[in-house]
Amino acid sequence: MTSNRPCSIMQQFMLFKSRNKYLTICFYTIFSTLIGSCNEDDSMRVERIDKLRAIGLASNPVVLSAPAPGSSGTVELTAFAALPAGSTVTATSFLDDASAYAPPVTVVMDSTSESTQQLGALDLYSVKGTVTVGPLTPEQQAILAAPSGKLTLRYGIRLEAGEESEDIVGNILVYPAGSEESAYQAVSVSVAEPVANATIGAGPDQVLSGTVIKPQSENVKVSWFVSSGKVTNRRAKETKWEPQSSGTQTVIMTARGMKSGSFALQAVDVTVE
């Protein structure tokens, strides 16, 4: 945290407003405060995995086709997290009632599905849970019967490792049977650079690039995660990475369909020299 500031942001504004002679001083201190905040954020970069980090959730099916009246459907959820090697993760569900438009649903977690894949510098944890949808209420059936009908249900999964905790919340989408949306498929990703098991340098211009395959027309949000260093633009399909540790490092690329909500990831290990 920045300390010993000459005046608060509000005081700076009031000084600027009332005394022009303070204009230069106050703009300087505001600028210094912003620079200090940026430096602080740089030490806690989102893309750097140095603690438990939820990175996404995949659903199967991607979109649930509305069950017939009196029947139910099932959606399987797979939550993913990355974390430093050697930690133990536990997963529980909770009711996320923050949305007025998406009723919360219960996720039945399957502890036997827990898996920890040991990557070069990280562990990739996953766990599955199921949600039963239906029988639909008359109100829910009416929502689906309306033009552009869509039913949205809210899930919540909490991951914990020691004193660290991450919540994964999102929506299960239900569309009328036979609709275009009910046939949505999952996106997929492929890391092009760096090549898996390659040896790369430690400079600031290491290339990160990948491709995203979209079975349907939709915008996709890309994210990069790394075990060391910083990424210039973690939301770009092609960007630059500056590793800050030598040895084996891990790079993870993820993609999420903005309309379908589908999710995919790929991880590669490299050696930094």
Image (cartoon, grey):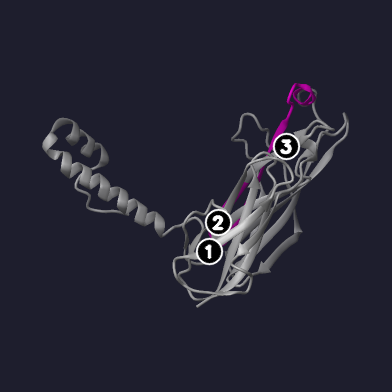
Residue 263 in view: yes
Verify whether residue 155 appears in magenta. Answer: yes
Percent x, y of residue 102:
66, 32
Q: Spatial distance from mark 3 to mark 2, Cα to Cα?
A: 30 Å
State yes or no: discs 2 and 1 in contact (Cβ < 8 Å): yes
* Residue at x-position 64% and y-position 64%: 267
State yes or no: discs 1 and 3 in contact (Cβ < 8 Å): no
* Residue at x-position 13% and y-position 33%: 19
Say which mark, if any, is on residue 207.
1
Q: Mark 3: which amino acid?
A: Leu
Local crowd size for mark 1, using a 10 Å CA cut-off: few (<14), some (14–19), many (≥20): some
Q: Mark 2: which amino acid?
A: Glu
Secondary structure beneath disc 1? strand
The image quarter in which residue 96 lies? top right
- Name which of mark 1 and mark 3 comes first in the sequence: 3
Say which mark, if any, is on residue 238.
2
Q: In the rendered structure, which segment of residues is drawn in magenta?
A: 141-168
Q: Mark 1: which amino acid?
A: Val
Q: How many tags in the picture? A: 3
- Name which of mark 3 and mark 2 comes first in the sequence: 3
